[in-house]
Image (cartoon, coloured by chain):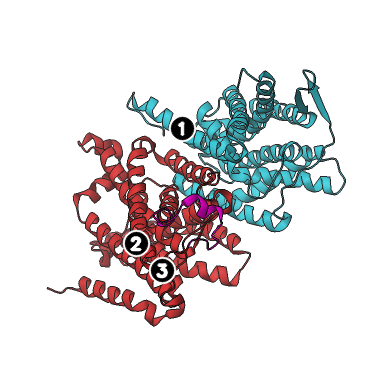
């Protein structure tokens, strides 16, 4: 049976596949948008559903970025010499080597952060509320500072990722990275949708609403918290790996562990769209990306000022996000039964 | 290395203690607003840097930068009240995460505005105080560091007395204990909150002016100061002034040793890593009693 939802999904899928050919000038922007949506939706797993507001998912993102690039280089050439030459074309990947390296690199970039999240999860996720937020903020910044001191991955001067091989030129490069990120987005969406229809989501919500009571009900909260974080880490690492190839240059504090930009963006996008909803982060990321590109184009130089103001305004005036606002306005659409008389009485009370 | 080169050890300890006093002053401001308003101010470090730039500008105009210690808290007090009126009063009663994110936004805003206004260069205000040599000039202490530690202690003592004796100080302490009860008994909590944030900003101004004399300032150097003061507060606890002073000095000494042993490029990284380790340590210590940090 074809219902309304599956028509919507098929429509989006067809649009997603056709998008780079319909808007060839915006290929890079579209791939960044896909990466942003992946980051926002996966942040939402622990930020929105579990109530653990993390600033530290940037750790997995940056880790994935460095790992993917290092594996891609290290599989065929000595890594230290590559970074020392600072991206000078002393070594050139053949197309086969490039794609093989990318595939293995993305796999490593997704799996290793997941393991890291599992390992540190037990210690970090025992913290609650703002302690968790500050601790993860510290983790992200510490990772950036420390990776900026490690010689083999380029230290302060950065790491140039392997350039795209000479097949099909610039067009093919854009399409390749677009489909990588779109594929990541599709997997992320399917996984999250699957997760949200199981008991797992209810457990996460129980942890958010009252962790002590959830524990008293016999739920092993720590186990579910770690699993939730690991799912986030998997997709953050994957997104980081793709983004590293797309940007073509990795710097420890400005690109990879960029807590000031990407680390806040993912939180902001989820809040803008509406925490704890399936579609909220997707809408939030899209709106945010359009806004951001507008800022970067029209307020060049003042973009961070605009960003700071935007953060304050969103946080103070739209803490419920777009989905929350829609929900308040059209509760019927969300399957909530509204008693009209009761609602009017409440409005009058306000 | 600690015992092989005793002079370096002494140097690092003294440097660390003098530095730690400054950290403790900033942390005291953070503890104040955290205790009273239940807000974690990520922009704390940026207020410090802004205070530093005020002293630096006085230096540029030919006034001795040490006068910044008096001028900068005055200006910063009003900056603090301005921030409170614009943003903070809307997040006081809300979820803590909202306040963290909102002050993060302020932090980014300040960073960038300072970058535009003052340029991205690392600057310092030269106080011309000279240096003191100890132990056959094996240990070198700039007099400006001693001066800054002395001034910090002076300000801290003044503030403690003010909080104990004055009417506003009593109102602040009452609000910290129970805001609702204070309101019922006629304390204008809104004003108290504004004053608290202003005093915090003024403390940051003093610390910033001292930092501009003793160390260097740069628009993007704010966040480490926030993290340091947060760390000191969680180690010492709210409202424990001797604890704040001690853990501030401890942190200063730790940083100096990390600087010597690991190298300067890992200094900031080690501070952030220490924060994570302290939080994790406390979490495991509390989880034995089936409690958690809250």
Tag 1 subunit = B
Q: Disc 3 or disc 2, which is closer to the eye?
A: 2
Q: Chain of mark 3?
A: A
Q: Is residue B1 above or below residue B225?
A: above
Which residue is at the far left?
Answer: A1
The residue singled out by tag 3 in the image is A31
Range drawn in magenta: A72-91
Looking at the figure, which quarter contains the C terminus of chain B?
A: top left
Q: Is residue A188 magenta?
A: no
From the image, state whether disc 2 or disc 1 is nearer to you.
2
Instruction: Answer above or below: position of A187 versus A64.
Output: below
Q: Where does residue A72 sit, x and y in percent of width and height?
A: 40, 57
Shown in cyan, the chain is B
Q: Which residue is mark 1?
A: B277
Image quadrant assignment for residue A126? top left
For marks 3 and 2, the one nearer the N-term is 3
Give the colour in which the image draws chain A: red
Question: Which of these two is toward me, A252 or B165?
Answer: A252
- Relative to B110, B271 lies left or right: left
Q: Please say if A220 is above or below A346.
A: above
Side of A85 where A112 appears, left or right: left
Residue depicted at 47% across the width and 49% down the height:
B98
Please tell me how crowded label 3 is: few (under 14), some (14-19), or many (20+) other residues with Cα within 10 Å.
many
Q: Where is residue B57 drawn, in percent x and y? A: 79, 48
- Considering the image in quadrants, where does the N terminus of chain B appear? top right
Mark 3, secondary structure of its residue? helix
Residue A17 location, quadrant = bottom left
């Amino acid at each position: 049976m074809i219902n309304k939802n599956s028509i919507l999904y098929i429509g989006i899928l067809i649009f997603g596949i056709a998008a780079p050919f319909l808007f060839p000038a915006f290929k890079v922007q579209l791939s960044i948008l896909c990466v942003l949506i992946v980051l926002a939706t996966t942040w939402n797993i622990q930020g929105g559903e579990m109530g653990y507001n993390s600033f530290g998912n940037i750790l997995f993102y940056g880790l994935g970025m460095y790992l993917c690039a290092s594996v891609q280089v290290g599989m065929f050439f000595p890594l230290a010499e590559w970074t020392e030459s600072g991206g000078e074309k002393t070594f050139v990947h053949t197309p086969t080597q490039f794609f093989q390296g990318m595939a293995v690199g993305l796999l490593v970039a997704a799996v290793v952060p997941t393991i890291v999240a599992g390992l540190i999860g037990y210690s970090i996720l025992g913290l609650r509320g703002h302690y968790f937020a500050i601790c993860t903020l510290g983790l992200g910044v510490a990772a950036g500072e420390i990776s900026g001191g490690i010689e083999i991955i380029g230290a302060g001067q950065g790491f140039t990722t392997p350039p795209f091989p000479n097949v099909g030129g610039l067009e093919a490069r854009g399409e390749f990275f677009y489909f990588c990120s779109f594929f990541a987005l599709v997997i992320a969406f399917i996984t999250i949708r699957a997760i949200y229809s199981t008991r797992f989501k209810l457990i996460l919500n129980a942890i958010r609403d009252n962790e002590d009571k959830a524990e008293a009900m016999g739920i092993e909260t720590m186990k579910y918290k770690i699993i939730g974080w690991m799912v986030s880490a998997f997709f953050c690492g994957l997104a980081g790996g793709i983004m590293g190839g797309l940007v073509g240059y990795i710097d420890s504090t400005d690109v990879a562990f960029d807590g000031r930009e990407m680390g806040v963006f993912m939180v902001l996008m989820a809040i803008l769209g509406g925490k704890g909803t399936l579609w909220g982060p997707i809408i939030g990321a899209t709106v945010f990306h359009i806004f951001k590109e507008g800022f970067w184009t029209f307020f060049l130089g003042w973009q961070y000022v605009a960003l700071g103001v935007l953060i304050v305004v969103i946080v103070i005036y739209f803490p419920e996000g777009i989905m929350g606002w829609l929900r308040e306005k059209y509760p019927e659409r969300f399957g909530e039964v509204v008693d009209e008389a009761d609602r009017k009485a409440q409005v009058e009370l306000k | 290395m600690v015992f092989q080169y005793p002079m370096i050890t002494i140097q690092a300890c003294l440097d660390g203690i003098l530095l730690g006093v400054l950290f403790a002053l900033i942390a005291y401001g953070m503890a104040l607003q955290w205790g009273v308003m239940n807000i974690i101010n990520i922009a704390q470090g940026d207020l410090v840097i802004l205070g530093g730039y005020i002293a630096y500008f006085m230096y540029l105009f030919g006034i001795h930068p040490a006068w910044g210690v008096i001028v900068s808290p005055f200006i910063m007090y009003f900056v603090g009240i301005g921030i409170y009126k614009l943003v903070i009063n809307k997040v006081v009663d809300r979820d803590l995460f909202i306040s963290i994110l909102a002050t993060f936004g302020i932090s980014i805003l300040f960073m960038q505005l300072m970058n535009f206004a003052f340029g991205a260069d690392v600057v310092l205000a030269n106080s011309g105080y000279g240096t003191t040599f100890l132990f056959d000039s094996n240990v070198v202490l700039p007099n400006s560091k001693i001066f800054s530690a002395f001034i910090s202690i002076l300000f801290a003592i003044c503030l403690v007395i003010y909080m104990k004796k004055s009417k506003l100080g009593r109102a602040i302490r009452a609000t910290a204990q129970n805001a609702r009860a204070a309101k019922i008994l006629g304390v204008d909590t809104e004003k108290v909150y504004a004053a608290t944030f202003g005093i915090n900003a003024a403390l940051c101004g003093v610390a910033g002016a001292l930092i501009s004399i003793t160390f260097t300032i740069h628009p993007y150097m704010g966040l480490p100061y926030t993290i340091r003061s947060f760390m000191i507060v969680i180690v010492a606890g709210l409202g424990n002034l001797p604890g704040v002073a001690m853990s501030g000095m401890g942190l200063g000494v730790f940083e100096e040793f990390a600087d010597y042993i690991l190298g300067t490029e890992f200094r900031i990284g080690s501070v952030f890593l220490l924060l994570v380790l302290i939080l994790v340590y406390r979490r495991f210590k509390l989880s034995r009693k089936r409690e958690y940090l809250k």
